[in-house]
C-alpha cells in the first residue's frame, strides 16, 4: 500500500474507508456520464458479486448457528428424558431378558437396539 493511500483524506478512490465508497468511486459519473475506466467498472462488478456471495454466506452461517442451537436444545431435552427413563427403570425394576424389557407383568420387545423407545412404551402403561 502506498503512502498516498494512507495519507489521503478523500472519501473516494484510493482513500475510501468502506466498500460502498470504493464502489462509488469505481463507477463514478458526472451528470450521467461515466468517467470510470472499463477495468474499474469490471472491478466494481466483481466487488458486487463478492458482496452478494458474502451476504449469502452470512445467511448460511446464521442458519447453521440456529440449527446448532436447536440441536443443542434437542440434546438437552434428550438428556432430561434419559434421566426420566433411568429413574423409571430403577424405580420399577426393569430388567433385560431375551431381547425384551420387563417391568412387573409388562413386557416390551427391543426393536433395532432402540432401548429408548422400548422404555418409552413401558412408561406409557
Image (spheres, rainbow, N blue to C red):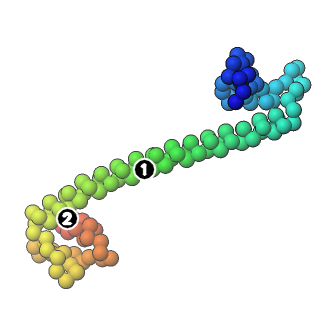
Q: Is residue 56 above or below residue 16?
A: below
In the rendered image, the residue lying farthest to the top is: 9
* Residue 43 percent coordinates (x, y): 78, 38
Residue 109 is drawn in which quadrant?
A: bottom left
Q: Is residue 49 above or below residue 72?
A: above
* Residue 80 percent coordinates (x, y): 24, 54
Distance Cα–Cα, label 1 vs label 2: 30 Å
Residue 56 is drawn in which quadrant?
A: top right
Query: What is the quadrant of the C terminus in the image?
Result: bottom left
Query: Which sits in the foreground, 104 or 70?
Result: 70
Query: Which sits in the foreground, 102 or 57?
Result: 57
Inspect this view and state whether residue 11 appears. Answer: no
Q: Residue at x 21, y 78 (%)?
A: 100
Q: Which residue is mark 1?
A: 68
Say which of marks 1 and 2 sits in front.
1
Query: Which sits in the foreground, 103 or 74?
Result: 74
Q: Residue at x 86, y 20 (%)?
A: 30
Q: Is residue 103 left or right of residue 1?
A: left
| Neighbourhood count class around disc 2 (C-alpha, 10 Å): few under 14, some 14–19, many 20 upward | some
Q: Which residue is mark 2?
A: 123
Residue 108 is drawn in which quadrant?
A: bottom left
* Residue 64 percent coordinates (x, y): 49, 49
| Neighbourhood count class around disc 1 (C-alpha, 10 Å): few under 14, some 14–19, many 20 upward | few
Query: Which sits in the foreground, 75 or 42?
Result: 42
* Residue 65 percent coordinates (x, y): 46, 46
- Reading the chain from its start, which is encountered first: label 1 or label 2? 1
Amino acid at each position: 500500500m502506498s503512502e498516498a493511500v494512507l495519507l489521503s483524506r478523500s472519501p473516494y478512490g484510493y482513500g475510501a474507508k468502506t466498500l460502498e465508497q470504493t464502489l462509488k468511486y469505481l463507477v463514478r459519473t458526472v451528470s450521467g456520464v461515466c468517467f470510470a475506466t472499463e477495468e474499474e467498472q469490471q472491478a466494481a462488478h466483481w466487488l458486487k458479486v463478492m458482496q452478494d456471495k458474502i451476504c449469502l454466506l452470512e445467511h448460511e452461517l446464521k442458519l447453521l448457528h440456529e440449527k446448532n442451537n436447536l440441536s443443542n436444545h434437542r440434546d438437552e431435552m434428550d438428556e432430561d428424558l434419559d434421566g426420566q427413563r433411568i429413574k423409571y427403570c430403577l424405580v420399577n425394576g426393569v430388567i433385560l431378558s431375551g431381547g425384551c424389557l420387563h417391568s412387573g407383568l409388562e413386557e416390551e420387545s427391543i426393536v433395532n437396539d432402540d432401548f429408548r423407545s422400548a422404555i418409552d412404551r413401558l412408561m406409557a402403561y
